[in-house]
Image (spheres, rainbow, N blue to C red):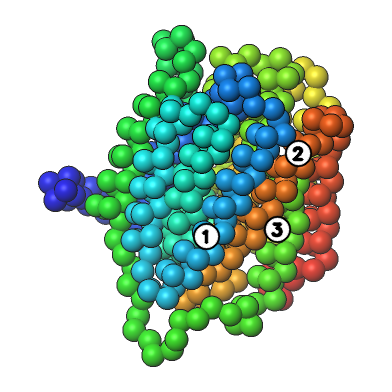
Amino acid sequence: MRAICSVEDLKEETIKKAPRLERNVFYLGFVSLFTDLSTEMIYPLLPLFLSATLGVDKAFIGVIEGIAESSASIVKVFSGLVSDRLRRRKLLVGLGYSLSTFAKPLFALSRTGTHVLIVRLVDRIGKGTRTAPRDALIADSSQKGRMGRSFGLHRAMDTLGAVFGPLIAFVLLPLFNGEYRAIFWLSFVPGIVAVLIAVCLVRERLAPPSSERMQFSLVRVSRNYKVFVVIASIFALGNSSDAFLILRAQSVGVSAGIIPLLWMFFNIVYASTSVPGGVLSDRIGRRNTIMLALFVYSGIYFGFAHAFKVVHVWILFASYGVYYGLSEGVMRAYVADLVSSRFRASAYGIFHTAVGLAAFPASLLMGVLWQFYSVKVAFSFGAVLALVAASLFWLFVKKEED
């Protein structure tokens, strides 16, 4: 391991040439890049694998996605609290990435929808373990006034992995005669690279000594943070798994072989808009940027409700990438703005848990509404909730300058 870690010495010049970019932001970006490459070799194929290979219906796909994401969210709050209590981030970050990496190849062994659920659960528990400490470490490592840029850059690098992952899946799928399981096995390779970077190159940011007991309490955080968590949770009830977007694309006429390219296209737009979205939030405020993102999301879901041509799907996936560029990194930066650095991991854990717990009913509702009513009803529900969330944000979240 020491020999591998010596690669750090070769990277120092790269870091020195970018003095405004903190090394942890840089390396955590690469950790997320390789992890997402591994994930996205699987993710756009998983709904098709469940539906076509294992014969799982849409309602149970919603159950799988909802349970997996909600369980991960429960872990996030505990990992955040533990990270703040220990005043350590890196251990939990490394553990979380390791769990996800070693779980992914097990999709290849799945024979039923229940098997997929179990593997998905372990993978998402890994994500839940790492997310809050990692976001806190990025915030701790970022310069004041550049939080949006740092999170935007991290989201962009994360999403570059989501660009290359589907591309690799697209190339490999015909080579393996459409055999999904072979691609699931190969996803292990970039995951191991991510774990090695996290273990060897990311540095702990030691908190200054303090006699104060590190105990998170909602009394000690701002009103805006609490209101933001509530509104984000309401929005999340209509923000179902992206697996349904893939199934919608297929129902409109996008072939299974093209799905990885469509997902790659979405992630190219996402990656290219993440840094501009973060910089925009540094300039005009997180509040305004988040409200803009919610309106964009609402328009996209109304679009998916009424799409009937393949070209519509491509336009909507591009717009969905813009939404992510305006929201993912910005919301994380906003949490950092609203809480003390002493409680950042706990605050991230609570935020991600609240939003993630809504993932189960969101995905379940989407599956049920689609299966028993119609696709228009299912996607319109999400669009309406986004409008409700944007309105509540405008009414109840104070401007930053207030």
Give coordinates of residue 258: x percent, y percent: 58, 16
Q: Which residue is label 1 attached to?
A: 76
Question: In screen coordinates, is 237 left or right of 68?
Answer: right
Q: Residue at x 60, y 71 (%)?
A: 338
Give coordinates of residue 17: x percent, y percent: 29, 50
Q: Nearer the viewer, residue 5 or 370?
A: 370
Residue 207, disc: none
Q: Is residue 64 visible?
A: yes
Considering only order in the chain, which callout, 1 or 2, is on the residue closer to the N terminus?
Answer: 1
Pair 3/1: label in front: 1
Q: Nearer the viewer, residue 171 or 15?
A: 171
What amino acid is found at the position of numbered circle 3 in the picture?
A: Ala
From what the image shows, is residue 188 above or below residue 342? above
What amino acid is found at the position of numbered circle 2 in the picture?
A: Met
Give coordinates of residue 380: x percent, y percent: 84, 38
Q: Nearer the viewer, residue 15 or 311?
A: 311
Q: Residue furthest left?
A: 3
Few, some or many C-alpha atoms within 10 Å of disc 2 (few <14, some 14-19, many ≥20)? Answer: many
What amino acid is found at the position of numbered circle 1 in the picture?
A: Lys
Give the SS element for disc 1. Answer: helix
Q: Alpha carbon of mark 3 to alpha carbon of mark 1: how far?
A: 16 Å
Give the SS element for disc 3. Answer: helix
Q: Which residue is label 3 attached to?
A: 232
Do the residues under discs 2 and 1 have CB atoms within 8 angstroms?
Answer: no
Few, some or many C-alpha atoms within 10 Å of disc 3 (few <14, some 14-19, many ≥20)? Answer: many
Q: Is residue 376 visible?
A: no
Q: Alpha carbon of mark 2 to alpha carbon of mark 1: how far?
A: 24 Å
Q: Alpha carbon of mark 2 to alpha carbon of mark 3: how far?
A: 18 Å
Q: How many marks?
A: 3
Considering only order in the chain, which callout, 3 or 2, is on the residue closer to the N terminus?
Answer: 3
Q: Residue at x 23, y 47 (%)?
A: 11
Q: Which residue is label 2 attached to?
A: 366
